[in-house]
Image (cartoon, rainbow, N blue to C red):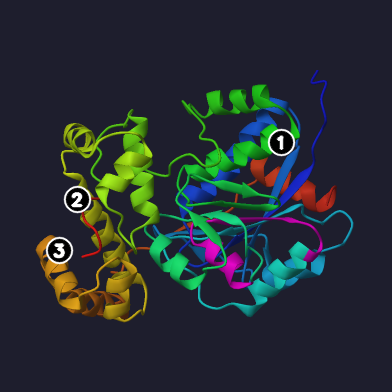
Amino acid sequence: MLAMKIARRLFSLYLGPGFSLQAFSSAVEALRLANEVLESESYAWRIVSDDGHPVRSSCGLTISVDTSLKEERGLLGKMGFFPSVAVICGGSHPFSANQALHGWLRECRARKLCLVGIASGVFSIAQTGLSNGRRCAVHWEQFPTFVEQFPSVVAVQSAYEIDGDTYSCPGGDAAFDMFVQFVIEDYDTSIASRVCEKAAAMRVRQPGDRQRLPLHAGAAIHHDGLLKIIEQMERTLDEPVALEDMAASICLSRRQVERIFSKQIGRSPARYYLEMRLERAHLLILNSQLPIVEIAMACGFVSASHFSKAYRDSYGTTPREARSEATEHLRRGPAARPIRHIEKVECASSRQANAARNDCCWSASRT
């Protein structure tokens, strides 16, 4: 017998076109395993799409849903159907402007629901202004575009963030980590540990943990000073800081920092800093409509010609050619692939969803 507070959360998970199946299934699996550990249906979920029709994920698999966005909005406030968490499951690209989705999110916030953005789902929440002033975890590939579009949001490249009633993660396995936090909030860490054991998860990351290893790092970095300098670099890509100043901030000499970089990353600090700036520029070229000159300035280059040369040396093409190729790729669309369709089956997770409806219802200065 579990002598603890019994939670009853109903998650409304909105699936947009091209959502990440990995992230979606990771989130739902955390809830399913929690129910299994608790031996109760403490967590239930309802799957939502724009029109109530199945939604195709980024990998081509199509998932059936429970209801449409219009019907879901109609359930808000109705006894037995009222959710406690609204989840936007995104993928590699932000959704097109969707006033119905934005209206649902605003109504959910007005009714004090938690808002959760997974992968590009964080863009949808930011578009409504509901995440202004809050910390949001954004996927590193989407990060440059996000910070340019939403300067009022405190965007970070962490595994996930919880800021009041706003939750966010970059997708992938981080969705599992974030949803385990709901279990910790409602119960305790012992229940969460048993969930992780069932999932064979060696470690669940905490809010604020790094989203990925630093650029070019093939193994975990154990030097705190090096990580602090890399974090400084990440924060100052638009206005590069001299290596001497960064080294002084962690009480090391320039030569010591250079030796640490060479040993652990195989790059000089200057080269590493430049590659970080070029990586951000590359992502902005592919995923934004910013003029090339503005991208150069946003990544710490005062000379467009120097930026173009550095970019060509690194990527083998000019910035304009890279954008042209990316635009053409989007115009052609993804290569055709067979569509596999997953029909819902009456399993434990489906019974939980039905029960919910029925019952609860450096050295470089600026170059």
For the question of whether residue 166 can be seen, the reply is: yes
Is residue 126 on the magenta stretch?
yes
Question: Which residue has dot 3 on it?
Answer: 315
Kindly state the secondary structure of the residue where label 1 is placed.
Answer: helix
In the image, the segment drawn in magenta is 110-128
Residues under labels 2 and 3: Cα distance? 18 Å
Pick whichever of labels 2 and 3 is earlier in the sequence: 2
Find numbered disc 3 in the image and state the secondary structure of the residue it sits on: helix
**In screen coordinates, is 295 left or right of 94?**
left
User: Is residue 217 positioned above or below 310 on the image?
Assistant: above
- Looking at this view, name the residue that lies furthest to the right: 79
Front position among marks 2 and 1: 2
Q: Marks 1 and 2: in contact by CB < 8 Å?
A: no
| Amino acid of disc 1 | Glu
* Residue sitting nearer the eye, 296 or 51: 296
Assign the N terminus to one quadrant of the image: top right
Residue at image location 48% in from the left, 56% down from the top? 138
Which label is found at residue 270? 2
- In percent of width and height, residue 223 lies at 32, 29
Give the residue furthest to the top. 1
Tag in front: 2 or 3: 2
Residue occupied by mark 1: 185
Q: Nearer the viewer, residue 310 or 225?
A: 225
The three-letter code of the residue at mark 3 reads: Tyr
Question: Does the rendering let one see residue 213?
Answer: no
